[in-house]
Image (tube, rainbow, N blue to C red):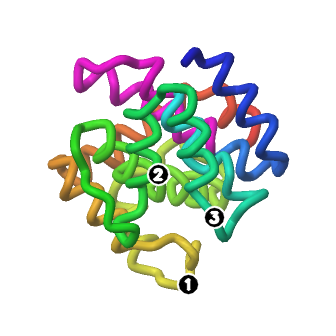
Amino acid sequence: MTIHDAEKILEEMTETESLLLHAQTVAHVMQQYASRFNEDPEEWYVTGLLHDADYEKYPEQHPSIIVEKLNSLGEDKIAHAISAHYTKWNVPYNNTLDKALLACDELTGFIIACARVRPEGLNGLTPKSVKKKLKQKSFAAKVERDEIEAGINMLGVDMDEHIRFIIESLQNCDAVKEAL
């Protein structure tokens, strides 16, 4: 599946600016991580872009609608990663793509939330300040901290390095530059 194909699917299923931004930011971070893990950047971008595509229109069925669509298109690896991006769904993590999506999803959204409350946005944002905000349960309260921790552990990366990597990736993301 090409990025263009994935963008069409996302546009059909998602309308809100906040969810579109989340999709674009997770896609960008995933694409950056693909290079680090010597994986296919386009496949990883598409996975990040579509991971929540059905959430807005079908919240009670998420992610089954997008997973079924991707499976029908022969995109089984992407579909599996999306079906596993929440540990409570009890889907096995078979490869680095599955683990990276879990590790990047919630934390990318959380880092965007951190940037939005700072006058300088992402500039000067450090892992230390992100971890401090993670301890504040009232800040971005819907973000599940245990999912962030599970993803980092599963991917086998250092928390500070992972946070720093996401911040640096987002600083080069056009969607973020427009939104913040």
How far apart marks 3 and 2 lie (CA) works out to 18 Å
Q: Earlier in the sequence, mark 1 or mark 3?
A: 3
Determine which of the numbered discs, if any, sits on residue 61 in the image: 3
For badge 1, the amino acid type reads Ser
- Number of marks present in the image shown: 3
Determine which of the numbered discs, if any, sits on residue 21 in the image: none
Q: Is residue 87 left or right of residue 177?
A: left
Mark 1 = which residue?
A: 138
Disc 1 packing (10 Å; few <14; some 14–19; many ≥20): few
The residue tagged with tag 2: helix, strand or loop? helix
Query: Do residues under tags 1 and 3 come within 8 Å of each other at their CB atoms?
Result: no
Determine which of the numbered discs, if any, sits on residue 105 in the image: 2
Residue at 39% across / 78% down in the picture? Answer: 135
| Quarter in which the N terminus is drawn | top right
Which residue of the protein is positioned furthest toward the bottom in this rendering?
Answer: 138
Q: Is residue 146 left or right of residue 122?
A: left
Look at discs 1 and 2 and give the one toward the viewer: 2
For badge 2, the amino acid type reads Asp
Determine which quarter of the picture holds residue 7.
top right
| Residue 62 higher or lower than 156, as above or below | below
| Quarter in which the C terminus is drawn | top right
Q: Is residue 98 left or right of residue 9?
A: left
